[in-house]
Image (tube, rainbow, N blue to C red):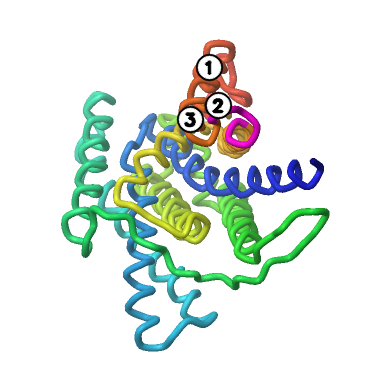
Amino acid sequence: MLSTVSQQLLNVIMLGSLYSLVAIGFTLFFGVLDLINFAHGDVFMLGSFVALFLFMTVAFFSGVNFFTVLLLFLITGFIVVIAGLLIYKLTIKPLATSPPLMMLLVTVGVSIFIREGVMLFFPDGASPHPFPKIFPETTYTFLGMNIPAGYIFIIVISIFLVVAMSIFVNKTKLGMSIRATAQDREAALMMGVDIDKTIAVTFIIGSLLAGIGGILNGAYYSTIKYDMGFIAGIKGFSCSVVGGLGNVYGAIVGSFVIAFLETIGAAFLPFGAEYKDVFTFIIVIIFLVIRPSGLMGEKKFEKV
């Protein structure tokens, strides 16, 4: 029994780490732009397909090694950052003075564009694709748990990205501009903050986290599909709402709460594995009725 519980806790850490990479983007976009970016989940999906294409290309010429995988992460990160910037420059920025509903609808359109584009133009894009083994296949045993080396890499990379993002937001000038814009956009503008540059950097951070998250998700599940960004986006958004939309640390806490509910429900409830998504969203709805501001949100909904 103890080994089963330990194994499920490992799964919670895994899922929570992956969900955090998506949820942070949602909360950053909302904090800076008051925008729910429904294209964010498909940037996550795009990262996994870009990585798959690059892996097939690079591995064909040089085989699989540490430098191949590192190159895979670097190039994929660069491409999804460009994609995020294009989403901002071509769709969000021109509607900056429009009602929020217009920007929301545009992100839905961009989401459909990315998803259908992958389905149509990626070879056999409508079918699930096996994702390559980019991490060692060694398995370790600790406290009754079987821990694949890939799990360790995924958790460590996720923690590194979240810590790096936190340091950037809290210790750099651009990061402080993001925080200032999130707290009071008008005041930040009067203090000389370049709002356009700040928003662009926000899209860079959010897209990079989501794109790398897509690679890690493919490595974890060993399969990717063109429509997986929809569920990833809904779960990332739910995590950020549970934690307190607009609060970065709340998004991380919410991610682990959702991961815990999903994992425990799938492991210990009858038919839990088949209905884990339904069970999770029911709990989210109940939770939001009880505390709509989220675990770390303010009742006034002050954005951080």
Callout 1 touching callout 3 (CB < 8 Å): no
| Label 1 environment density (alpha carbons within 10 Å; few <14, some 14–19, many ≥20) | some
Callout 3 touching callout 2 (CB < 8 Å): no
Can residue 155 be found in the magenta stretch?
no
Q: Tell me the kind of residue under disc 1.
A: Leu
Can residue 266 be found in the magenta stretch?
yes
Q: Tell me the kind of residue under disc 2.
A: Val
Instruction: Please report whichever mark, 3 or 2, sits nearer to the chain's N-terminal start.
Output: 2
Q: CA distance from mark 1 to mark 3?
A: 20 Å
Instruction: Please report whichever mark, 2 or 1, sits nearer to the chain's N-terminal start.
Output: 2
Q: Which residue is mark 1?
A: 288
Q: Tell me the kind of residue under disc 3.
A: Tyr
Instruction: For mark 3, give the secondary structure.
Output: loop
Residue farthest left in this picture: 120
Residues in magenta, as a range: 265-271
User: Could you tell me which residue is drawn at 54 percent across and 80 percent down?
Assistant: 66
| Label 2 environment density (alpha carbons within 10 Å; few <14, some 14–19, many ≥20) | many
Q: How many marks?
A: 3
Q: CA distance from mark 2 to mark 1?
A: 7 Å
Whole-percent x and y of residue 302? 54, 23
Q: Which residue is mark 2?
A: 242
User: Could you tell me which residue is drawn at 33 percent across and 47 percent down?
Assistant: 42
Is residue 282 in view from this perspective?
Answer: yes
Mark closer to the observer (3, 2): 3
Callout 2 touching callout 1 (CB < 8 Å): yes
Position of the N terminus by quadrant: top right
Give the camera-side residue of 157 and 177: 157
User: Could you tell me which residue is drawn at 52 percent across and 28 percent down?
Assistant: 280
Mark closer to the observer (1, 3): 3
